[in-house]
Amino acid sequence: MLNFLAKRLLSTLPVLFIVSLLVFLMLRLTPGDPAAVLAGDAASTEQIALIRTSLGLDRSIPEQYIIWAGHLLGGDLGQSYYYKTAVTTLIGQRLEPTVSLALITITLAVLIAVPLGVMAAWRFGGWLDKALMGFSVLGFSVPVFVSAYLLIWLVSLKLGILPVQGYKRIADGVGPWLYHLTLPAITLSLVYIALIARVTRASVLETLGEDYIRTARAKGLPEVNVLMRHALANAAVPIATVIGIGIALLIGGVVVTESVYAIPGLGRLTVDAVLARDFPTIQGVILLFSFIYVMVNLLVDLSYVFFDPRIRY
Amino acid sequence: MKLNRRLAAAAALSMLSIASLPALAQGTVLKVVPHSNLAVLDPIWTTAYMSRNHGYMIYDTLFGTDENGKIKPQMVDSFQISPDNRMYSFKLRKGLEFHDGKPVTGDDVIASLQRWGKRDAMGSALFQFVSRMDSPTPDTFRIFLGEACGFVIEALGKPGSSVPFIMPKKQAETDPFKQIEEHIGSGPYVFKRDEFKPGDKAVYTKFAKYVPRSEPPSGTTGGKHVYVDRVEWNLALRDPQAQVNALQKGEIDILEQLPFDHIATVKGDANIVVPKYANFGAQYMARFNHLHKPFDNPKVRQAAIAAFNQEAFLRAQVGVKEIYKPCGSMFMCGTPWGSTAGSDLQMKSNMKKAQDLLKASGYDGTPVVILKPTDLASISKLPDVAAQLLRQAGFKVDLQAMDWQTLVGRRAKKDAPDKGGWNMFLTAWTATDVWNPISNPAMDTRGEKSVWFGWATDDKMVELRNQFMRATDEATKKKLADQISTRAYEIGTHAVLGEYDQPMAIRKNISGIFISNSNLYWNIKKN
């Protein structure tokens, strides 16, 4: 197990190196000039050139990469061109809103989707099953920004229950924190509810046809126990996998949700950084996202041992 | 049981709502959604409007420009000009104090002007004439000119980027090509550096020791009375629909830039007002690249100008007739130097004339590369109109779509259009940036030394602007402004595409919006 863990952790290093190199090169090859963005509309070509020099953008691309990678090895992600602030500080400021949104979203999705999926499988072909399948199609098909605007219109503007936008830090109180995150989390969770519920249904449906389920029922076990202890437990591996993928996919989802709900998280930071060609920030955020992605996959792999004792590393 | 559950749910939501009420300890908080993000906190280092607006919050200026474009004293109490127009002596108002409690002195002013003069186009033009400055006493300073010029006061009171804000000497001595690290001014608001979260919010609190002038506010002049305790700029809320939603819900008080598409929506909301805050709006402009074919030929540029029917641009981009108007003035209509001299080429033109001019120009069919920003809704339709009108006139057009920041990087390139350069881009300027022949960036015709992209070359125009700088009486200046306008049309520096008012939207409980021709946050009350 420890051997597996060590190997997996070591394997993240080449992944992060390749990601860093690719992101660095792609950004340098993409049109756009951070110096021109910073200089403003009325700046002259000479002023822009001076800013470019001050940012080190007049150096060759390999030279720029070596300097950046050198700082990275020392744990320094560099300084944002746009905000003139350390990238680590910016990420630190933006981490809480994104982690909060992701956690609430995934918790909401799991709490709703797994029971729904189990019940749909249990009542296969019934109205609940059909309704769930219909909802799944809707959940997958409606883009996040459309469901966001529809929910804002209904819940915030018409009913006046929740705010239209904004974020309150958890330090300001759990109430305001939840009050501001409820609607964004509901919006973002729709697609994950659809995804997880569908996979749960398919997976539980498969196990419900197994001999051990028939045996359990023949022994007279209550249906709840059959479903939860035998069917769901044995269907957990694919569900855990899809939840893991869901967490990784959330990274993309928060970009849109944070923009619509004006949540100052990593998604919004990424959008701003891309628009401003803020290379150090984009590189830093993407490296962080890659690391999270790798770690989530590792945790999912480790969770298999818990769900299925037959699996050994 | 069902009722109890509903009650419990309602109670939980109510608790959340109560918990989200703003802290009363903050006093009156004015919540503003500015037109863009605030990134650079040094308004001299960049020409970005957001940095300028941040500057107006925390710094003060020696002079200001009133709602009609007239320059009036602001930090200056009184001033005198020597009979030969070569020495200006100024006395500062009593009670001027920086946020750190130190008094504003002549030395602070001199250091601030020197830094500004190294970055701003009008500032650097002024410093060609300045031989020295001194501060005989702490509350006075003098500017000595090697040669008389007529725009000293105009430059010191200019409201467009970069504004000569007065900073403490220590800050002002920062290399002009490096950003300042401290943000201490003597303006009506104190910048809360500890609460500034880039891309999230910027906070300003009332500077209790600020002594406003006695005159009513007008433009950037007059009394800067602060009636709120705190102003918060929401920098995270940038989706236009979400901005309007937040205004309708009362989560914000002021939306600086109401998208044209949403005017009808907010006008139907009894809680929202669209106030008048500007006498002069903004101007759309098409800029030619004078370095490369086909726009290196003035006759081709004239043909393009003749094809550019302003109404077509305004109707497509703004669409609301009440807030746009065609105007042939290079310096905008109704401004101090506003002049339609020479504009017949465009304003009394038609497509037949444009076609004839193009034929006569010897145009060889070189495609015109137009840069189109797809993500900047405020100008994104202009390039399509330009492309269509140019095609109708007989041009070959290569319309290239890109995001605004790519465009910003590309327009700075002097390369040929087929090697990553360009022939034309379209943009918008606020009146304060283009209403003066010296500060209007498109009027700089010093070729590759010009301060703005497009690099127009014309010695006669350079000479006319030099005369304008040196003229000391209003009549001569007005005459020269007319001549500059005529010359700009003759050589086709650029094409003006009409004017519009950028609407702002506020909640009904906000009062005190005055004619500022900008986004200024003093004199505002929140009931």
Image (spheres, rainbow, N blue to C red):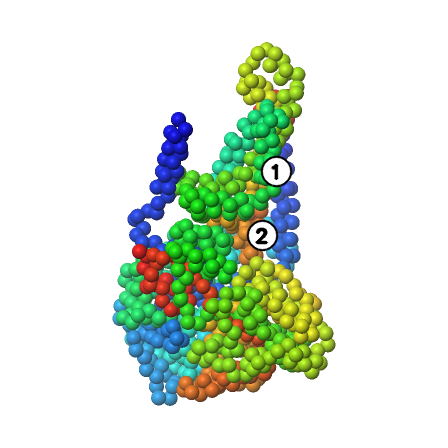
Q: Which mark is residue B280?
A: none
Chain ID, mark 1: A
- Residue in view at x 30 percent, y 78 percent: B78
**Residue identified by numbered label 1:** A137
**Residue identified by numbered label 2:** A68
Front-lying residue, B300 or B389? B389
| Secondary element type, mark 1 | helix
Q: Which of the two labelled residues, at mark 1 and mark 2, occupies the earlier sequence position?
A: 2
Residue B147 lies, with reference to residue B386, above or below; the image says below
Binning the other alpha carbons within 10 Å of mark 1 as few (below 14), some (14 to 19) or many (20 upward) gives: some
Chain ID, mark 2: A
Residue B267 lies, with reference to residue A241, above or below; the image says below
| Secondary element type, mark 2 | helix
Confirm whether circles 1 and 2 share one chain: yes
Q: Position of residue A252 (x, y in %)?
A: 57, 44
- In the picture as drawn, the residue positioned furthest to the right comes out as B364
Front-lying residue, A234 or A224? A224
Residue A208 in which image quadrant: top right
- Residue in view at x 49 percent, y 44 percent: A151
Residue B318 placement, left or right of B371: left
- Residue in view at x 39 percent, y 56 percent: B270
Q: Quadrant of the C terminus of chain A?
A: top right
